[in-house]
Image: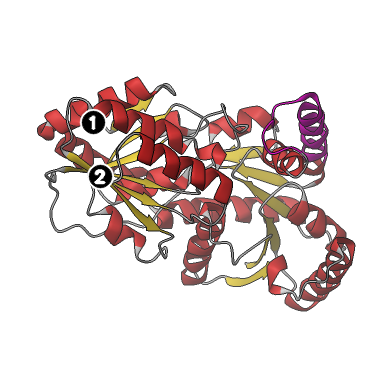
Amino acid sequence: MRILIILHKEKKRGGLVLQFLKMSRIFKQEGHKLKIFSMDSVNKQKNFLGNIIINIKILKKIVKEFEPSIIITSDPFITTSMALLSNKKGIPIVSRAGAVYHSFYAARIFESISYEKIYSQLYRFLNQILKFIAKIFYKKIDFIIFNSQYLSDIYANSNSYVILNGVEISKLNTIQAYKPTRLIYVGRIEPRKSIELIIKALAILNLTSNNFMVSLVGDTSMNRVYWNKITNLIDKRNLSSQIKILGEIDNQKLPAILQEHDILLFSSDERNFPMTEGLPNVILEGMANGLAIIATKIAGVPEILKENNGFLVDSEPEIFAEKIKYLMDNKEVLIQMKKTNIETIRKNHNIENVSKKYLKIFEKIIKRKNS
């Protein structure tokens, strides 16, 4: 096959982009030709419409010269619309859906108007309009691959399939429980991640046991207003000595950092920001590197987190604190969760096996299109 992948921003190495890049490596290893086009690889003009026109011209040229067997897009709006506008040869188009895009874009648009009050009548109006547009685009393409059943249920498209995310299998020499217990948060530093939930839980935990250390990994410059709110909360709750701020970590160095910890904390909820997660890749990365998981029960998280490999919790700091304390006091349970997570990734979320599932679907779509 000749596979053309269209990304919005390749330089912004979030979970979506990393998933595509890792799968691309497997596609090449399996003997397929591959080309990746990203909009941020083109010199930008100040005019948004001008950028779109330039990108479409370049894409048309790529489609003509590369002659892909199939085109893969990464969202229902920007990359899918560009694929439709650039494709005049009837090449099948598949979209890989990894987020609640209409909620994400509606919230991002509304943030520029009123950062403090996302939930409003205007936001709800934008949300419904974008959801309607997304469904139209999804009907115009050949197939959608959702990364969770949660997303599939939202968009309810019959011409689709669910393939959960995959990650690379990490090499761990030993599995142990550290003293003091080491906790870690990895992700964007912004309101939709609800990091204050973690800080409040740690403050509660600190009342009965201070035998823990916490690492915060993420770009602290992304949202200065929110980061100031978090640092002020850390100071107010007297946690500065127990929280280490690591900042943004290169993705290749992240596994080694994760392996030096016991528990990954995931706190996203809908109090500050609409739910946009599909299947958070950071949870799979934590599992692959031998961490137990404590996470809010949102989006596709319940599809991968069960009783034997972590805790699904409500968005309440008291419950977060209770589960952390339980694992701190029960090291044998903590170690067993670590082992279970490594085995779960090996069996169900190996990036090589996930990539081959994608390839099988591509082959079926191409055959169906040709026939």
**Mark toward the start of the polypeptide (2 vs 1):** 1
Nearer to me, 227 or 148: 227
Q: Which of 57/54 is in front?
A: 54
What residue sits 55% from the left and 32% below the top? 149
The secondary element bearing badge 1 is classed as helix
Residue at 24%, 54% (x, y): give it.
259
Label 1 CA crowd tier, 10 Å (few <14, some 14–19, many 20+) = some
Residue 239 falls left or right of residue 54? left
Q: Residue at x 83, y 33 (%)?
A: 129
Does the rendering let one see residue 241? Answer: yes
Going by the picture, which residue comes out furthest to the bottom?
Answer: 65
Magenta stretch: dominant SS?
A: helix
Residue 125 is inside the magenta segment = yes
Q: Amino acid type of disc 2?
A: Gln
Which range of residues does the magenta coloring cover?
A: 114-136
Residue wearing tag 1: 206
Q: Quadrant of the N terminus?
A: bottom right
Q: Which residue is mark 2?
A: 242
How packed mark 2 is, by other alpha carbons closer than 10 Å (few <14, some 14-19, many 20 or more), is: some
Q: Amino acid at mark 1?
A: Asn
